[in-house]
Image (cartoon, rainbow, N blue to C red):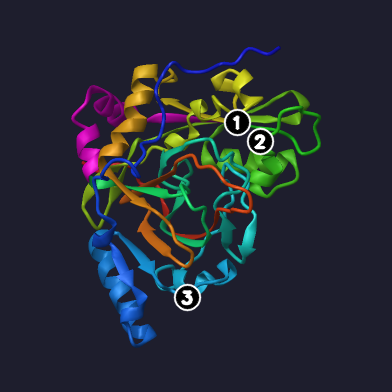
Amino acid sequence: MSTVICLDADLRAPDFSKIEPPLDVEDYRIDCREFESWPALEKEVRRRFSRKGAVLLTDTGLDDLGRLDRWGNILIDEPMTYQGGTGARPRFGENIYDVLANEPSHAYIYPHNEMSYLSRFPRCLVFGCGAIPAQGGETFLFDNQSLTREILETDIGQKLQGSGVRYVRNLTDANGADDVVYKHWQDAFDVSTRGEMEDIAGREGWTLEWRENGGVRLSYWREACENNEVLEENLFFVNLSLLGAYFDDWYPFDTIPHEDRPFNVIHGDGTPFTEQETEYLVHVFDNHCLPIFWKPGWIAMFDNERWAHARPPFTLQPGERRKLGAMMGNPKSRIGARF
C-alpha cells in the first residue's frame, strides 16, 4: 500500500453559510430586471466595474452557457483561450470553458488569480451559472487590494515581495505509459512535438527537463506582485491553487512527493513553503472574501488583478449538478511590481 504524503496544516475552506462573510454581495449586485434597455445595462455594468472591479448580475435570463459571450463581451474586447493552463477545460462554446472540469468536488481549489503563473494572463473573467446544488457550490472572490496590504505587513509577505515564487509543473506524455495522469504537455500547450514544447519553454525562459515516459518538468520564476495601473498599486499575484498540497486528499496524487506532483509553487529561492507559511497564505484570504452563492442565470464579472477567486468543496446529491461556464480576455503581459 502506498504511503500518503500530506501536510500537517489546516487548509480547510471557511464556511460562510455559518459565519458572516467580510464583504456583502449586495454591494456588487446588479438586478438586470431594473433596466429597460440593453445599452442602459451595459453602461451600468461598465460604470460599476470600473469602480469596484467586480459585479454580480442577477435575473439575466441566461439559460445556455454557450451564449455567455453575449454578456462577457460587455467587458471583454479580446477573448483568450486556455492555452498553457493547468487543468482540463472542456468548452461550452467558442472561448467559453467549463469551470468545474475534472477537479474533485471534495478538494478546496485555493485562492488564485487566473493564469498568474504565465507571462500573459487575462485581466477580465466572466463566470456564468447554469446549475447549482441546493447546498454548497459557491465561488469565493477576494479583494486583492486589502489582502495585499495585510500580507505585506508580515515577514512572509516581505520575503515573497523580495524573492518572488517559483512554479514547477510536471506534465505527462500523451503517448507515454504513465499510470498517474493529470494533464499531458501536448494538451496543456496545444502542441504535438518535443521541438514545439522546447520552443515555448525557450521563448518563455523556462527551465525544461524531459522525464522518463516522455513527460516534462517545467520550472520558472515569477514576481509575487503585479502592478495594477488603475489602482496604481502593486497587488499580490501568486497562484496558490498550484500548491502541491492541493493533491493531499486526491488519490493517487497524494502518494507522490509534492515536488513531483502535477504542479507546485515554492519560494523564489527554491525552498518549499513551511507548513505554517502555507496555512497562513491560504487563510489570510478568508479576511477579504466575497462569497457568491450562485443561482442559475447569475453572472459574475471581475478584474483578475483586483480580485482573486477560489472554489470551496461541495457535495452533490443524486440528480444535482454544479455547472459553471467561464470566459476570459483582455490579455496583459506580466510587468511585475513597480516601486
Residue numbers of the magenta segment: 146-168
Q: Which mark is residue 167?
A: none
Q: Main secondary structure of the magenta part?
A: helix
Q: Residue at x 59, y 43 (%)?
A: 87
User: Is residue 283 left or right of 70 when viewed as pictured?
Assistant: left
> What distance separates the C-alpha of mark 3 from that of mark 1?
39 Å
Tell me the crowding category of disc 1: few under 14, some 14 to 19, or many 20 or more residues within 10 angstroms, Cα based. many
User: In the image, residue 135 lies at what x, y percent?
Assistant: 46, 49
Q: Is residue 152 placed above or below 234 in the rendered structure?
A: above
Name the residue rendered at 21%, 44% in the picture. 146
Three-letter amino acid code at disc 3? Answer: Gly
Is residue 311 left or right of 305 when viewed as pictured?
right
310, above or below 301, in the image: above
Q: Secondary structure at mark 3?
A: loop
Q: Nearer the viewer, mark 3 or mark 1?
A: 3
**Mark with earlier residue (2, 3):** 3
Task: Name the residue beneath numbered marker 3.
Answer: 61
Q: Which residue is mark 2?
A: 182
Amino acid of disc 1: Pro
Above/below status of 303 relative to 176: below
Q: Residues within 10 Å of mark 3 (few under 14, many from 20)?
A: few
> CB atoms at circles 2 and 1 under 8 Å apart?
yes
The verdict on residue 174 being magenta is no
